[in-house]
Every structure is written in structure tokens, then in C-alpha cells.
Image (spheres, grey):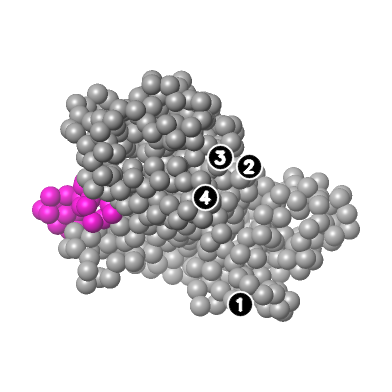
Amino acid sequence: MADIFDTGDIDPEIADLLGDDTSPASIPDFSDLFEDQIPDRQRDPEDVPVEDFSRESFAPITRWEQDPDPVFFEKNYYSKVLTGEGEISKRVHSVLQKYLKAEDPQEKGVYRQQLIPAWWDLARSMVTHYQGPMIEKRWALRYGYFLPTLVSPEQRRIISKIVSKNEYGEPIHYVDEWFDLILEGNINPLATDELKPSRMSTQNKTKALMEKAKGSKEANLTLLRTLIVKRDGLESDLQSQIKQIIRHDSHPAIPGIKAAYTVEQKQAFNRSGEILRKLNKLDKDISLNIEKFKDADVELGKLGEKIQQMGGLSKADKGIMESELDSIKQMAKMCVGRQGNHIPILLKNFFFPNMDLIGTRENVMRCMDQVEQVDPGVFRRTFRQKTNRIVPHTIIVPSYGEKGVCWEPFERFNRSTSRGRIAIPMFPKNLKIAVINALGDLRWNVSKERAGHYWMEEGLSGHYYQWFSAKKIRGDVRLNFLDDYVLWITKEVDGVQKLDKEVRNIFWRYIPFTQPVKDILRNRGFVYNELYKKDMNRQMSDGY
């Protein structure tokens, strides 16, 4: 094993496999692969995106790419990724060499299967100290950019120009940025809900209780705001009724005497009485929720003090970070699917040297914005009569997956304002389709969670499931829904009829297009015109 690393030159056979770009300046130097190296580059601290539910749309994109980062062209990039990782780095290096040198397809497939778990073991090691001085480890986790000569010079240049920082405050993260948020204690780990309470540390139990108290506080605050708005409306109505009651005209036949109450004023008596009864009931609800809010606030304060006594939650322990990496690995598998390409590192044959086709933060934002322009309710969540636009945490996973997925629609202890978690593959065949799949999956899971035990009977999921069952369609109802959602967003929006008639009716009702789109579609054929008329009939019957 030692002779693998005792030369500064790459194996000629591997050089041939890697193409023409194998000049000494571009080939990693393996001579000091596992020696301590002097740090020569550090990552600047990045700002954590601020929670903001007041935005009605995505922030405008001002920059699509940056100047090329020279670190992606460094001679010793590969050796810096592997430095300090112990035996696992030797195993990865050995398997990689065998994989690249193998000519027999069957033999190459064997080494391919060995390389995949070896890389994830390496990533599991790096995730506990990727914030160190060697930024190469961060880029390896973020992009799967491992050995520079495994990609073409043009592909290398494209990767180096991806904007590295979050300049928009949107909750769209590369995997290393997600790990940063975990380490800083700003979000809950993906694997939190999978841990059994008996196996959770005291610190994690306290944090779970803190999230529950925070969710209760925010939910009560949301309800209080709704109740106050309702009270203001009733008080304004009461004020107008009182003004009507106390206004008296002079009696037409008796000078100096004001007339008796009119029929309208007597009706205002009854209306005022009804308003007062509603205000009395509303005041009880407000008082009750004020007490609940105060109790949750006190509980939150106590838990905060307890956390401070424990030394805070600013740093996650090694076990949490390793579990988080395992969750990211599972996300990647879900994005790729059983029959997809599970190679976890960048290879030149598997992605196009085109910035527009890569799942960069900016491109993902653009695709999500395009979907929201068609499906305006995709990020809207109503909880206790209050609707917020809540964009989910979006993790860009370095994989060749074809579909985005929803990990969870919202956090278990805070359904009112917590962000869900979705994953988008960085190198898909079609980025927009991958994003549409992820948002369709979000739609499906939100509908199921809202309906609870009745998800097969109520709402979007219920109506779709009943149609699915009635048609006796085989397979997974969720996957079938996602295929139909893609058609809804990409075809039906332009009047191209691809869906079953009943599915179109369900989507028109529960995943409505914007009104301008509906106005256009009503003139695209009898089918859409009939759906438009049903909308008008529903609007007219709302007051009855």
C-alpha cells in the first residue's frame, strides 16, 4: 500500500484515462498526501440567512457566477482533500486507481460499487472537521469535486465560477452550508426525529423541548393576531351601530323634540347585542391565548437558561454530524433512485459543462420562482386562519439524481412557521423537472399531514387517492401524483391537455393556477372553460 503514495507522478495508465489535461501543473502531488500541511487558505465566515415571512416572492438574482476560484486549479487539491483522514483516505485512493485503470466492464463495475461506500465513509470523516483551514474539504463535500483531473478543463472552470456565498437570504443551502447551520445550532438536524428519546442526549432532549415551546409560542402569537384583527372588525362595526343609534332627527310635528328610535335604529339594538356577545366570547379566547403565550414564553426562558448552563448549543457533537451526513446520503439515494447513477464524485462523462444546467443556488431559485408563478400556493401555509409564505429549507445535494424530494413538509413541533426540508440534486438531467418534483412532493406531504388519518379521504391527497384507487392503477400513488404534477406545471399551464379529466378537475380546485393563467386557459378549449365556470359558481355561492 505504501508504494501507492511514494511518487509525485500519476500512473501513466490513469493519466491516459483522464485525458489530455495531465500536465505537471494539473496533476495532484501525492508525495505528502498524509503529512500535516501548513494552512494557506481559510474560508470567510458566511452570514446565516435571516428568517423572513414577509416576502411575497424570491429575491431578484443579481449575479449568476463569480470570478473563477483558483483553488479549483491547485496542483495539490486532491492531496489536501485526503490529508488527515487516516486509513479511509488510503482506501479511497486505492479503489479510485483500480476503478480508473479497469478496462473490463464487469471489473470496473466491481470497483465502482466499492468506490461509492468508500467515498461516503470519507465524507463522514470530513464532516466533523471540514471547517478547518483546508477549504478543499468543504468543496469536496459541496460539489463532489474530488480529483481535478477527473473532469475536463471546461467543467473545472464552470465549477470554479459557481457563486459560493448566499447573497439573497433565501433558505437554499449547499450541503456544507447546511452543516454550518447545524454546528451553529440555528436549525434542527435532519435525523432528530429518528432518534429514540432514550438514546437522545440531555442536550438534544432540551433542544427538542425548546422547539416545542417555540412552536407553541409562535402558534399562539399567530392566533392572537388573528383574534385581534377579528376584534378590531367587530369593534368598528359596533361603533357604526352606536353612531346610528345615537343620531336623532327633530320630530316633524313637535318643535324642540327629537324623534323616537326608527325601525333601523331598533335593528341596530339587536345587531349591537350580537356584536357584544361575540366580543365577550372573543375576549375570553384572547385572554386564554395570552396566558398560553406567556406560559410558553416562560418555559422558553427556562429552557434557554438550562441550555446556557450546559454550555450552549453552539457546537454539535461528532455523532450528530455523522448522523447528518448519513441523512444527506439517504437524500442523495432518494434523488437518484434505484436504477440511477450513484457515483458520489464528479466525473466528466456524467454532467454537461453548462452553468445553466447545474443545480446552483441561483438556478434552483430561478426554477422555484418559475413554479411559484404558475402555482402561487406552493409555499403558502395557513395555520389557525393565518397564511404565511414559507419557503422550505432547500438542500442542494451533490448527486446525479433526476428528481428532487421532500424530506419533511414542516417540523413536528412547529407546524405553524417551521420550514420544511427538500433536496435538489446538483447535476440532474433536467433541473427544472427535478425542482418541480421536489415541490410536488412538498405539496403531497403537506396535504397528507393536514388531513392526518383522513389523508385518503380529504383534500388534495384524498381526492387524488380516491381517483387512483377507482382507476385501479398499480404502483405508488405518490409517484403517480408527482408525474401528474409535472404535467400540470409544464403542459396543462399552456393548454396542452395531458391529464385525466378527473385529475385535471382535482388540480384545478386544489392546486389552482394564477388568475391571469386561468383567464388565458378559458379561451383554450371547452375543458378549461367549464372549469372556469365552476370557479365562478363557487365564488357566487360563497355567501350562502
State the residue position of label 4: 104
- Is residue 321 located in the magenta-colored stretch of the structure? yes
- Would residue 473 be found to the left or right of residue 439 on screen? right
Q: Can you give x and y, in whole percent of width and height, for residue 454 in the image?
A: 55, 77
| Residue 98 locus on image (x, y percent) | 40, 46
Image position, residue 290 (x, y; %): 32, 61
Q: Is residue 398 above or below residue 451?
A: above
Q: Secondary structure at mark 1?
A: loop
Q: Which residues fall within the magenta stretch?
A: 295-322
The three-letter amino acid code for the residue at tag 3 is: Asn
| Image-quadrant location for residue 463 | bottom right
Query: Residue 387's spot in the image, x, y percent?
Result: 52, 54
| Mark positioned earlier in the residue sequence (2 or 3) | 3
Q: Is residue 63 visible?
A: yes
User: Which label was assigned to residue 370?
Assistant: 2
* 1 vs 3, front mark: 3
Residue type highlighted by circle 4: Asp
Q: Is residue 538 above or below residue 308?
A: below
Q: Regarding mark 3 in the picture, which secondary structure is present there?
A: helix
Q: Is residue 471 above or below residue 96?
A: below
Q: Amino acid at mark 1?
A: Glu
Disc 1/disc 4 C-alpha distance (Å): 54 Å
Does label 2 or label 1 sit earlier along the sequence? Answer: 2
Residue type, label 2: Gln
Q: Is residue 424 visible?
A: no
* First of labels 1, 4 by sequence position: 4
Whether the residues at callouts 3 and 4 have beta carbons within 8 Å, the answer is no
Pointers 2 and 3 in contact (CB under 8 A)? no
The residue pinned by badge 3 equals 349
Disc 1 from disc 3: Cα separation: 46 Å
Does 343 sit left or right of 458 as displayed?
left
Residue in the picture at 51% in, 26% down: 20
